[in-house]
Amino acid sequence: MNLLISFNHLYTNWYVSELYKLLIDKISNVSGINVEIVNSREYAKHFNINSDYHNGVPSVLSPMNLLIMNKDNGKTFIHSFHDYSPAIMESQSGIDNFNVVKFSCSSNLTPHHIERFKNKFEIQPSVYILELINEHDYINSNRYNVKNNTKAYFNGLCYGVRERYKELLSRSDYFDFRKKEGEFYRHKPDYYSEISNYKYGLSLNGAAKICYRDLEYFGMGILNLRETLDILTYEPLIPDLHYVNFIDYDIQTKIHNQNYEQYIINKLEEKMELIFQNENQINNMIGESRGWFERNCIPNNQVEILFSFLNKFEIFL
């Protein structure tokens, strides 16, 4: 079988292209499979498609994507790590230039998308990744550190509703809420060293809903406190098994109402007190989330998962 593989290895250590490169190496070593690799930015020129955003949506040939095509019949598999990857399934992305038989992603993927596009191609929920592939080294070297700090930690970019949570939770002694800039900006080694002191981590939806903090906490053995995560992943993430369903719908609907500020603070502090009282349950959840991390986030396991989506190359027949 003759395969054309399009991706863009933007820079060393960037998780997206490093993981795709590992997958390509595995495919290239399969007997009877011939691989031609093309740069997605250059390939986009053949179709007059932008390689970042196209017609207002992420391009089908974005550097966040991997495209694998059977050169003999055009059947194509696409994987995306783009924050807004479901939008790539729309015609505006340039996807209609390819005979796509399977599309895989996790960021912002919901059952609605599978229902909407079910007659167009198969949709496969995928894995999620850290920002840099060497972060696994920082996780492994810090995850057994003694966690003495019982405040719920957050250090990330603050945009949208995150600013509102920062405003409220900075008033509470139960939370250590930091904005990732200025004095609170941490380079990766210092960041992992710092969070290794905390038992609890707060995760707020990012552009992809799931965010780096979810994986960081799972890997580090830190209890993940977050709002319900309603996206689809290869192995489902289950509230109150892998993470605490901490920010409920009631809080989400009141967060912008100034009349409920103290109500929200009190409610989240009461939830923290309940967590403190259920140490056995907490330890079980940390174990479950670490197991999920090992199965779904270790690079070698991720390569095997992505490779399995090709169904022994039968999707290209």
Image (cartoon, helix red, strand yellow):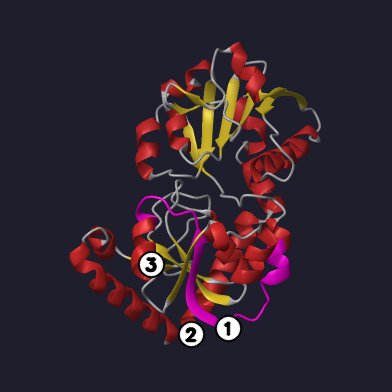
Q: Please report whichever mark, 1 or 3, sits nearer to the chain's N-terminal start.
A: 1
Q: Please report whichever mark, 2 or 1, sits nearer to the chain's N-terminal start.
A: 1
Q: Position of residue 239 (x, y in %)?
A: 41, 65
Disc 2 to disc 1: CB gap under 8 Å: no
- Spot the residue most to the front: 182
Question: Amino acid type of disc 3?
Answer: Asn
Residue 184, above or below 300 = below
Q: Position of residue 15 (x, y in %)?
A: 66, 46
Query: What residue did someone put label 2 on?
Result: 279
Question: Amino acid type of disc 2?
Answer: Glu
Q: Nearer the viewer, mark 1 or mark 3?
A: 1
**Residue at image location 44% in from the left, 62% down from the top:** 238
Residue 170 in sight in this render: yes
**Residue at image location 43% in from the left, 32% down from the top:** 87
The image quarter containing residue 225 is: bottom left
The image quarter containing residue 135 is: bottom right
On-image quarter of the C terminus: top right
Query: What residue did someone put label 1 on?
Result: 148
On-image quarter of the N terminus: top right
**Residue at image location 71% in from the left, 66% down from the top:** 140
Query: Circle 1 — which element?
Result: loop
Residue 146 is covered by the magenta coloring: yes
| Numbered range of the magenta stretch | 138-162
Residue 219, above or below 197 = above
Question: Amino acid type of disc 1?
Answer: Asn
**What's the CA distance linking mark 1 and mark 3?**
23 Å
Query: What residue did someone put label 3 on?
Result: 245
